[in-house]
Amino acid sequence: MSATGLIDPAEPLERQNQKLLRICEALMKRVEQGDDDRGAAYSQFQRAVLLEDQVRERTRDLEHALDLLNESNARLAAASRETERARSDLAGAIETVQEGFALFDPDDRMVLCNSRFAMHLPDIRHALRPGLTFADYVALVSRSAFLDLPPGMTREEWSVDRMARHGEMHVVFNVRMAGSRWVQVSEHRMAAGQTVIMQTDVSDIIRAEREEQGKLLDDQARLIRATLEHIDQGVCIVDPRGRLAGVNRRLASVLGLPLTHLRSGLDFELVLSRLRTGASFGPDATPEEVLAWVRQEGRRRPLRFELRRGESQWFDVFAEEMPDGGFVMSLTDVSAEREAAQALSEANELLEARVASRTLELEDALGAAERANASRTRFVAAASHDLLQPLSAAKLYLSSITDELADPHHREVVTKAQNALASVQDIIEALLDISKLESGRAAADVRTVDLGALLNQLRDEFAPAAALKGLRLTVRPTSLRITTDPTYIKRILQNLLANAIRYTEKGRVLVAARRTGGSARIGVWDTGPGIPESEQENIFKEFHRLGRRASASEGLGLGLAIVDRACAMLGHPLTLASVPGRGTAFTVSVPLAERSSHIPAEARRAAAGDWRHDGLCVLVIENDLDMRRALALLLGSWGVRVLDAGSADEAIRQLQETGLRPDALLVDFQLDDGETGVKVIGRLRRRLGRVPARIVTANRTSAVAAQARRIGVETLYKPLDPLMLHLFLGSLALGRTA
């Protein structure tokens, strides 16, 4: 029945809708009842479809795995074929090698070997198979009847020694086989632990070497025989049994014996007994002592003694043991040397007497020179004092009338006269300073000095002179305090400043100081004409003036001489640096003051009467013989023990021979063969420690002084001033007493 048959179109619309709703509900219930019966079957169907898909997917994976397995099997088979081919090729290649070859794995088991391995050992070849351990291989070789063992070695000892060599990374050795055959074994350990052994037949090489060695020994024997026959010494060779193994004709001639009495095989004790009858033994060894030395067992020390034949023939005998227990004895005729030594001894005695006489003469001459020098010093001092007195009076008289003169011309004349008197006074004072410094009578009163205040005084003193010449004088302030003699340091700086202003025509003059370690370096720089290098040594000489006329108004060239000697007396290094056309710089290094300014009186005075330095030892190295002798004589007169040498090598030999350690070194800067004193002091200090030293030189350039300062050594300039040496040695004495 259809829905249209159940619904009447004539019925109201609401009625029709209600019927339709009931019809729909009935249909829905029917459909739901039908679905409950078919749900289980549909679920089984879905599960079956899912299982079929999974089986199909697993089947595809299995097929892919089978394909991969087949491919791997094919590759493995190919690799196996390649490996077998490579093994076959390796075996073939090893078989073509002329040497024996074997390879052991890291577990010391044989991997392979060729047919030449274990050559000359046919009784063990059947046992050489892969898998054989190295220890079993060594045991087989040690028991082989074809192994020729070294003398005194058992087969077990050989096996132990072979295994010990196996423990090394690389080893090469020779093994002797029966029938005078030799095999060289080369064993090498690889990085992965495998062991490679190569065996090479070297029988022909060893036989050739032995033949060559035999020829060489024969040649050496002939050479030794020819040498023994041509040397001037008598020589005999004694074997370990005490019998003559060789002797030359010279020995028979020296001993005055027939050669038949010195035949080979003769007992040496018979030779010794014949020596006793024909010669006398010296004091070094008796015949019994020589015989005891010959019979001594064990290691014998070399033996030396003398033989005397007649009145004038002497022989030096020397015997020394050989490695095999025998010994060689040589006899040397030293008669001429003995005669020369006797003559030399007599000449030495005569020379010593002459030297003693000459020394007395030199001492007398030195005393006379010292007296003359003292007399000159006293005269200069007295004359200077007597001259300065009337000069001062004259200056006072001129000053008193200057203001009373109305005529300007007269005033100009008086002013010039005053200037001339001032110049004369400066010259006299300079002469007095030079005299004191040269005579060693200058006294250094060392104290703490305010350097800033001193430089301010010098600025005020020299500013008018600089302004008069149109120069700019610059004195840089400083707060440094120094330890020195205030009078002499002022005199030094005055002379340097006066010299700079005198020679500088335009530009400036600079005075400055700076700290350098434990010292203050005080410098005076100018823009003057400079000093040529060829003149830098001469300007420190008395009365030497560079390019200036020697007049009283310009000075007489004593300023720098005073500076040089005063710096040397005080121990203040002085350096000079100059560039011609650009200017000159003088630098003085002065020790800085310590917290305590107290200085012992002994260190502040240098009196000529105390110039004794007994107990000091000084090493002098000077290649000029006259200079070295003069310096040694001067130091010796002060009680100093002197070691003098011309070079560093000679000095080292003297130190080794005497065993002395010098207290100080005086070394010339320019020695022979291009060697410098700076290098020599360095060599000696490496042997002796930091010994006080001075460089002695005539070269006043800054480069030399700089080299000396780099090793902490000051410089003494030639011509050498005795005062400088005295002060240096005096500082050593103070250091020893401290």
Image: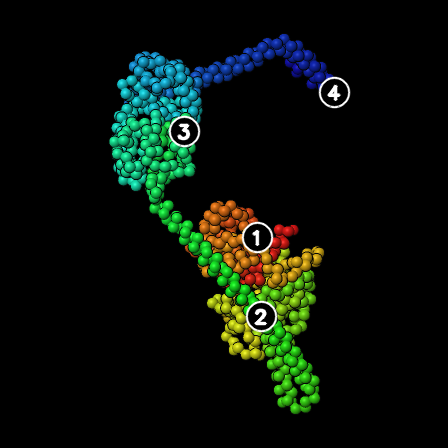
Mark 2 or 1 closer to N-term?
Answer: 2
Residue at the disc numbered 1: 616
699 horizontally vs 32: left or right: left
Q: Which mark is residue 300?
A: none
Secondary structure under badge 1? loop
543 horizontally vs 210: left or right: right
**Residue at 57% across / 12% down in the picture?**
47
Residue at the disc numbered 3: 292
Q: Residues within 10 Å of mark 4 (few under 14, many from 20)?
A: few
Residue at the disc numbered 2: 375
Determine the CA span between mark 3 and mark 4: 163 Å
- x, y percent for residue 506: 56, 75
Mark 3 or 4 closer to N-term?
Answer: 4
Q: Between 52 and 573, which is closer to the camera in this rendering?
A: 573
Mark 1 or 3 closer to N-term?
Answer: 3
Mark 2 or 4 closer to N-term?
Answer: 4
**Residue at 40% across / 51% down in the picture?**
344
The picture quadrant where one finds residue 331 is top left
Mark 1 or 4 closer to N-term?
Answer: 4
Task: Kindly tell me whether residue 343 is visible in this rendering.
Answer: yes
The picture quadrant where one finds residue 440 is bottom right
Q: Which amino acid lies under the numbered mark 2 shown in the image of this protein?
A: Ser
Q: Residues within 10 Å of mark 3 (few under 14, many from 20)?
A: few
Determine the CA span between mark 3 and mark 2: 74 Å
- x, y percent for residue 723: 57, 62
Up-down relation of residue 358 to residue 206 (above or below): below
Determine the CA span between mark 1 and mark 3: 49 Å
**Residue at 48% across / 46% down in the picture?**
657
Q: Quadrant of the N terminus?
A: top right
